[in-house]
């Protein structure tokens, strides 16, 4: 069957992504490029740090505050003069407001050092992969004068909007939603949570995360594990990933006589606190903090594991869970965000309440004590990914979204 491609080539500018980008963003951009989209990725990154390995994607570096002053000053002056003489309209929209008297010169320079290079682009569509990026780049909406798409992945809606009561930030979040041509939500639940902050469901698109099942797949042969059952989790070592609740669940599991251990993949600012909890609970011989791993290493570790555990307090839909499911692992996950849209309780694994180590341990116990149940749930998990969460399916939906906003813009221009 012929793979669908972009109906007509268009240029997509992606802004607000770190370097290197998250694996799920990398695969999305490469998938779009393979379908004929001209993908440009603008990233703020220190001098000398970018080695572009993204297939078909043009990566443009924007000066970073750590760049040598002479270098960053020269680049800024060049871009500023080019904007002033080649595109005076964009100059008037962007530069004078940034130099208004109420702004400090330092703040104005920091903003312009990012905005001025971006102002030279003429994309057909601009996409902010994170809410915060759109909020930080509101000035560019008028400059580009093209459809803008914003991805709503979770944290800005179900965490920051609740705990940070800064009226300016909440205003910027609402403004970004109002001005966007389309809003991408990773789950139905995230769409619901965004509506009190100005997210219009009429212009929202549900495009769930996806994985490449040819990369994330079960091991061709796996010998029977005679040792402890291997639990695994993947994610940043930060508070909202709930690693400490996973550790408490493991402690209860071991106290019940189950021989199990936990591998934790990821880095983050809470590593020291998590290490303390491991020793405090007497789990030093059962828990391994493995640090960051390459995608290839993550696949191997998943293939060697028995159960995937997600103890998060907040998610959109966890990419890590989908990767584990694609590798044929049964899952125990909290019911945060849109996780019930990916895991059916009792089918691909179990869904338990947030902050409930006892419920987590009970679900793990069922899987640990029943190898046949683990096998059935793992097969169901793989089948669910193949049916609903493949990268090819996701790229089809992205193309439909982008082409829809382009058609809407063309229609409004004619009218």
Image (cartoon, rainbow, N blue to C red):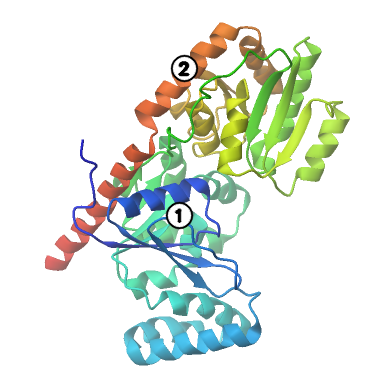
Residue 386, visible in the rendered structure: yes
Name the residue carrying label 2: 379
Up-down: is 15 above or below 143?
above
The structure residue drawn at horizontal position 49% and vertical position 12%, both measured from the top left corner, is 376
Q: Nearer the viewer, residue 209 or 329?
A: 329
Q: Nearer the viewer, residue 216 or 185?
A: 216
Up-down: is 286 above or below 198?
above
Up-down: is 96 above or below 151?
below
**From the image, which quarter does the C terminus lie in?**
bottom left
Q: Position of residue 157 (x, y in %)?
A: 51, 47
From this viewpoint, which residue is outermost toward the left? 415
Tell me the quarter of the picture where residue 388 sits.
Answer: top left
Tell me the quarter of the picture where residue 251 sits.
Answer: top right
The structure residue drawn at horizontal position 25% and vertical position 47%, both measured from the top left corner, is 400
Q: Earlier in the sequence, mark 1 or mark 2?
A: 1
**From the image, which quarter does the N terminus lie in?**
top left
Alpha-carbon neighbours of circle 1 within 10 Å: few (<14), some, or many (≥20)? Answer: some
């Amino acid at each position: 069957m012929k793979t669908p491609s972009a109906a007509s080539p268009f240029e997509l500018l992606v802004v607000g992504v770190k370097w290197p980008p998250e694996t799920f963003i990398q695969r999305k951009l490469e998938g779009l490029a393979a379908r004929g989209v001209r993908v440009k990725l603008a990233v703020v990154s220190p001098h000398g740090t970018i080695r572009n390995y993204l297939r078909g994607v043009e990566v443009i570096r924007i000066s970073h505050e750590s760049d040598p002053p002479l270098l960053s000053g020269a680049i800024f002056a060049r871009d500023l003069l080019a904007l002033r003489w080649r595109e005076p309209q964009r100059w008037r929209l962007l530069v004078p407001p940034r130099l208004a008297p109420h702004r400090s010169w330092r703040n104005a320079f920091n903003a312009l050092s990012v905005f001025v290079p971006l102002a030279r682009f003429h994309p057909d569509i601009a996409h902010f992969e994170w809410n915060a990026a759109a909020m930080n780049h509101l000035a560019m909406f008028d400059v580009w004068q093209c459809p803008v798409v914003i991805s709503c992945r979770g944290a800005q809606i179900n965490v920051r909007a609740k705990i940070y009561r800064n009226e300016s930030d909440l205003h910027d979040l609402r403004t970004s939603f109002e001005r966007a041509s389309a809003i991408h939500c990773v789950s139905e639940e995230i769409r619901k949570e965004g509506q009190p902050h100005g997210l219009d469901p009429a212009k929202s698109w549900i495009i769930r995360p996806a994985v490449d099942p040819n990369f994330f797949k079960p091991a061709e042969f796996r010998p029977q594990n005679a040792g402890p059952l291997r639990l695994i989790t993947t994610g940043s070592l930060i508070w909202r990933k709930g690693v400490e609740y996973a550790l408490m669940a493991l402690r209860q599991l071991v106290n019940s006589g189950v021989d199990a251990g936990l591998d934790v993949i990821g880095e983050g600012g809470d590593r020291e606190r998590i290490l303390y909890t491991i020793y405090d609970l007497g789990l030093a011989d059962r828990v391994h903090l493995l640090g960051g791993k390459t995608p290839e290493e993550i696949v191997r570790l998943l293939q060697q594991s028995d159960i995937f555990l997600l103890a998060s307090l907040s998610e959109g839909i966890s990419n890590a869970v989908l990767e584990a499911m694609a590798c044929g692992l049964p899952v125990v996950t909290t019911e945060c965000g849109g996780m019930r849209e990916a895991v059916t309780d009792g089918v691909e694994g179990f869904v338990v309440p947030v902050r409930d180590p006892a419920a987590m341990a009970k679900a793990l116990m069922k899987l640990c004590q029943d190898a046949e149940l683990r096998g059935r749930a793992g097969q169901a998990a793989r089948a669910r990914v193949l049916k609903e969460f493949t990268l090819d399916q996701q790229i089809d939906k992205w193309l439909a979204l982008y082409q829809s906003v382009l058609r809407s813009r063309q229609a409004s221009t004619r009218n």
